Amino acid sequence: MDNIYIEYHFTITPKEPGTEILIAELGAVGFESFVENENGVTGYIQKEDWNPTLLDTIFVLNSDEFSIQYSKKEVEQTNWNAEWEKNFKPIQVDNLVSIRAPFHENSHLKYDIVIVPKMSFGTGHHETTYMMVQHLLALDLEDKKVLDMGCGTGILAIFAEMKGARPTDAIDIDAWCYENSLENIERNNCSHISVIEGDSTLLVNKKYDVIIANINRNILIEDMKIYASCLNENGVLLLSGFYKEDISIIDAEVSQYNLKLETFIERNNWVALKYNKL
């Protein structure tokens, strides 16, 4: 007999990073599968693991930064892989980079990244990841030491190695992301990436030529001093995870650390900034 699941449909404004945060919190309390959509995410938990007060512990549902509505219903067991495959479409960046799943056809672009996102987050479809790939395309990464902070699926670390970076540290505080990055790094035959589970406290006495940080605005500001101290002279800092109207707030913080804004990319009001260390 099929298992019974409780299906929650969440509508989230703004969708990112609200969806990413919500998925991480729900995963920690027993939700086992997620399917993202244009308005938010649908999450599934086995009925036997569910209780009426389960969502009381989900911090983001009470955050002033996001508006989240949800509904729930009972469903029979779903073919998660079929749902995921139905919702995950391959993407291409500047006709040079392909980001796809193993079941998609190889489009034979210059760079081909194959990603299987654990629990369906971090596929490269979000504007911030797309723009970070564009920034990395424009950089000379040959033999550069790189940090991918908040690495998610490991997609940006993987692309950095494809462009010649070595070594690269990929760090994420989330256990799912840590495990998924390991899987995707192996899937893309990368051999110069170290994946580490943790936060910015791991960066003591570390030095990098390029730091990639695609995280929400508040965490970026909180950790900016650490990023700046880890960046080599003439190094590059790439920041994303926030909106165009946040640029002045981010720049006010970053400019304290001898870093100069060189350029930014905008996509659907999200931005990705490139700073150079003077």
Image (cartoon, rainbow, N blue to C red):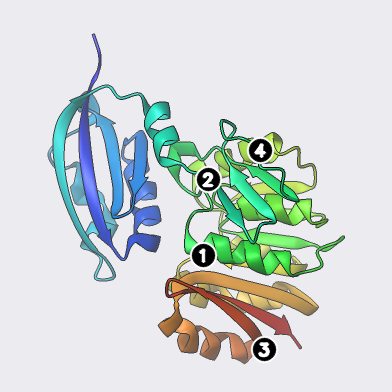
Dots 2, 1 in contact, CB < 8 A? no
**Label 1 CA crowd tier, 10 Å (few <14, some 14–19, many 20+):** many
Q: Which mark is residue 128?
A: 1
Q: Which mark is residue 177?
A: 2
Rendered location of residue 88, percent (x, y): 46, 41
Q: Amino acid at mark 2?
A: Cys
Of residues 276 and 103, the one nearer the viewer is 103
Q: In the rendered image, which quarter is residue 80 located in? A: top left
> Can you identify the residue that label 3 sits on?
260
Rendered location of residue 38, percent (x, y): 33, 53
Rendered location of residue 237, percent (x, y): 67, 74
Q: Amino acid at mark 1?
A: Thr
Q: Earlier in the sequence, mark 4 or mark 3?
A: 4
Residue at x 56% of width, y 30% of height: 103
| Residue 133 in view (yes/no) | yes
| Mark 4 secondary-structure assignment | loop
Measured along the vertical axis of the image, is residue 45 above or below residue 213?
A: above
Dots 2, 3 in contact, CB < 8 A? no
| Mark 3 secondary-structure assignment | strand
Measured along the vertical axis of the image, is residue 255 above or below residue 185?
A: below
Q: CA distance from mark 2 to mark 4?
A: 25 Å
Q: Amino acid at mark 3?
A: Lys
**Label 2 CA crowd tier, 10 Å (few <14, some 14–19, many 20+):** many
In the rendered structure, the answer to whether residue 220 lies left or right of residue 155 reads left
Give the label, 4 or 3, closer to the camera.
Answer: 4
Residue at x 32% of width, y 44% of height: 26
Of residues 128 and 174, the one nearer the viewer is 128
Q: Earlier in the sequence, mark 1 or mark 3?
A: 1
Residue at x 37% of width, y 32% of height: 83
Residue at x 48% of width, y 89% of height: 248
Q: CA distance from mark 1 to mark 3?
A: 20 Å
